[in-house]
Amino acid sequence: MSPDIVQALVKTIELKDLSTAAHTWRVVLYTRALAEEFGIDHNTIERLSLAAALHDVGKVEIPDQILQKPGKLTDDEFKIIQSHTTLGHERLVRMGEEDPILLNLVRHHHERLDGKGYPDGLSGDAIPVGARYFAVIDSFDAMTSVRPYRHEVGEDAAERALIELQAGMGNRYWPEAVEVFTKLYHSGKLNWILHYFNDQCPVPEFKSAAEIASEAQAARRAASG
């Protein structure tokens, strides 16, 4: 997929919902950091970063009144929200996308280890590896970022999120993924991402994973200096 097409899709997400766009950037940065921790090769890191950037592309088809609802969703509304996984997957397939890393992460990032996730109810090893690890990243950011229904951010929110992730080990989340992410967070390597784009910085254009990390850290240094 060309950078121009990726940027167009990310821009569409941004125009639909700025909080989703900011979430997109943070999970790309978390994904890159976690992949580097595992020593994954550069090409795969780029593919995973692209998948992270587009994981919520299906939300552009979700009605605004549901996507940005500040209160609790009804059962019917939640089913509509859940459809963003299949809508995003179907959109990419129609566009001719064939990369299994991208397609699997977009479709399966809300599956659960115990088979109670969606859209396909996959469990255990049937869940693609990238989606298993990304589920931890996605949930952590959702619990530590500004949303229509949540305003808690910062280190206290992060520690509470880690407790929630650890409580879900073995049923909702892949234990190894939680353990590695927790260790990486406590190392201090993720602190700057936690605050980035939480209504503090403009959302820039999508580029490669390396450029994202480099430019984001440069902006962070400039803001603090």
Image (spheres, helix red, strand yellow):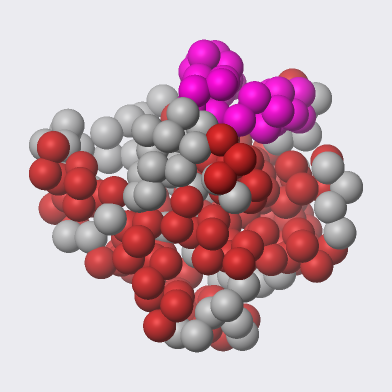
Q: Could one spot residue 10 in this view of the protein? A: yes
Relative placement, left or right, of 105 versus 178 is left
Measured along the vertical axis of the image, is residue 22 above or below residue 169? Answer: below
Residue 181 forms part of the magenta stretch? yes
Name the residue located 53 percent from the left edge and 66 percent from the top edge: 103
Name the residue located 45 percent from the left edge and 57 percent from the top edge: 107
Q: Could one spot residue 223 in this view of the protein? A: no
Main SS of the magenta segment?
helix
Q: Nearer the viewer, residue 27 or 84?
A: 84
Name the residue located 28 percent from the left edge and 55 percent from the top edge: 83
Measured along the vertical axis of the image, is residue 11 above or below residue 67? Answer: below
Relative placement, left or right, of 77 versus 3 is left
Instruction: Determine which quarter of the picture holds residue 191.
Output: top right
Residue 81 forms part of the magenta stretch? no
In the rendered image, the quadrant that contains the C terminus is: top right
Relative placement, left or right, of 149 versus 190 is left
Find residue 165 and report its horizontal and vertical position in percent: 54, 22
Q: Nearer the viewer, residue 193 or 106?
A: 106
Find residue 111 and report its horizontal and vertical position in percent: 45, 42
Instruction: Determine which quarter of the picture holds residue 155.
Output: top right
Q: Please provide the residue range marked out in magenta.
A: 155-184
In the rendered image, the quadrant that contains the N terminus is: bottom right
Find residue 38 and report its horizontal and vertical position in percent: 83, 42
Measured along the vertical axis of the image, is residue 68 above or below residue 159? Answer: below
